[in-house]
Amino acid sequence: MDNQKIRTDFPMLVKHPKFIYFDNAATTQKPLSVIKAVTDYYENDNFNVHRSVYSAAEKTTQMFEECRNKVAKFINAKTNQSIVFTAGTTQGINQVANGYYKYNLSRGDEIVVSIAEHHSNLLPWQNLAKEKNAKLKYIDINNDGTLNLESAKKIITPKTKLIAITAVSNVLGNINNLNTLIKIAHQNNTDVLIDAAQAAPEIPINVQKIDVEWLAFSGHKMLAPTGIGILYGKKNLLETMKPTQLGGEMIEHVEKNNFSTKEIPYRLEAGTPNVEGVIGLSKAVDYLNNIGMMNIQNYCKSLGQYLYDQLSKITDVNVYGPKIRQTGIVAFNIKNIHPHDAATYLDFNNIAVRAGQHCAEPLTKKLGVNATLRASIYFYNNQAECDQLVNQVIEMRSFFNGN
């Protein structure tokens, strides 16, 4: 993988060569092919999809549906009917909560999450558990931040209706052992939902191989525009799922006192969709496939390991998560320097990292800190940028200590 050549595909990196972007877990930069696709849509193909019969709009509809097919292949879904376009991971998870489990959960049933969940995969289940008088239970983590599978075996019971789990921690960067967890779940007739927001950009996904019921991810974390995401569901589950929005596009017939809906996935996509987002996502999938997801995973894992190791060598720097890295996400703190102050210092030196609780407050508290710094690497980053971050952290310690 030619990292230097890849960087020339990203206008932001070309225009700002001294700027180091290490906030890819929040959103990724966009390659020129995605930017051009969105621009070309507005200049040449700006028509609504599905409803129009004139040929120009039919071409746009074809482009729109081609993306659905690409995404189905990208995650190895059995059918493109399992692919629902959403606004992002958050909307996808909320649709599952409010369109399916709201009607399939009873008093005393259980929902299981991990203590490391992003708020988007926690708050919908907190809310639903309260509404349905169900019980919300937490899988703990080990000292190194990995998922405690022994804890999972004890917590998951035949009363557990759903396990909602992240594939990759957006704070610690570790990949959860989904195969084992899903096996435990299915032994108890329990469904599994995977938050793949951090997995889809870096890791090959095969929904048939892991046999998961639900999976959600966002386009903007994998080179696509914001406001577009994917909800995957097994066909039999989607067919019984109730739409969480009603309106145009999702109906077959409307009478004065009744209506009938289209088949899936269209009845779950009410209103005018984010057409330009879908077209951008289509090009993003092409770009990722061209590089190869295994190549991306290996590169990010290697560079993440390098940064983890270099930061770990610095006195008074605490790096979180397992010592053997699996992704490009590295969270750390510097003794006696608040993460917000550290992020500001790095910003003055043209390095962008994230500081805070990363929408995972229960995990932050579990780590015993108020916040962390997070450097999240993608395949257009390189070792030289990691070295600059490490050097700035060393200089920062001297600066704040008055040396």
Image (tube, helix red, strand yellow):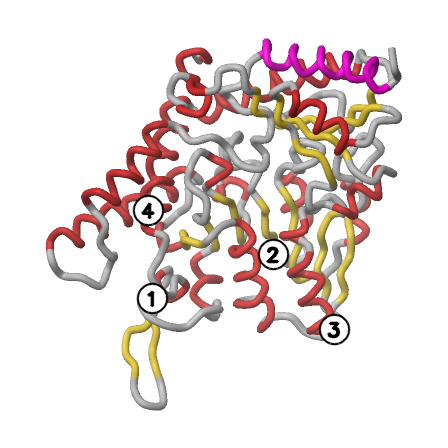
Q: Amino acid at mark 4?
A: Glu
Measured from the top left, where is residue 291 in percent x and y?
Answer: 40, 22
Give the residue pinned by disc 3.
Answer: 133
User: Residue 275: where, in percent of width, then height?
Assistant: 32, 51
**Which residue is more in the foreground, 359 or 124?**
359
Residue corresponding to mark 1: 263
302, 107: nearer the viewer: 302
Asked if the residue under mark 1 is in contact with the one under mark 3, i.e. CB atoms within 8 Å, the reply is no
Whichever of labels 2 and 1 marks the residue nearer the N terminus, that label is: 2
Q: Helix, strand or loop at disc 2?
A: strand
Residue 276 numbered tag: 4
Tag 2 residue: 191
In the image, is 285 to the left or to the right of 325? Answer: left
Q: Spatial distance from mark 2 to mark 4, Cα to Cα?
A: 33 Å
Tag 1 secondary structure: loop
The reply to whether dot 4 and dot 3 touch (C-beta < 8 Å) is no
The quadrant where residue 6 appears = top left
Front residue (pair 296, 400): 400
Q: Earlier in the sequence, mark 3 or mark 1?
A: 3
Q: Residues within 10 Å of mark 2 (few under 14, many from 20)?
A: some
23 w.r.t. 149: above or below: above
Does the CB distance between marks 2 and 4 fall below 8 Å? Answer: no
Residue bounds of the magenta highlight = 383-400
Residue 259 position in % (x across, y down) = 34, 81
3D distance between C-alphas at marks 3 and 1: 32 Å
Amino acid of disc 1: Glu
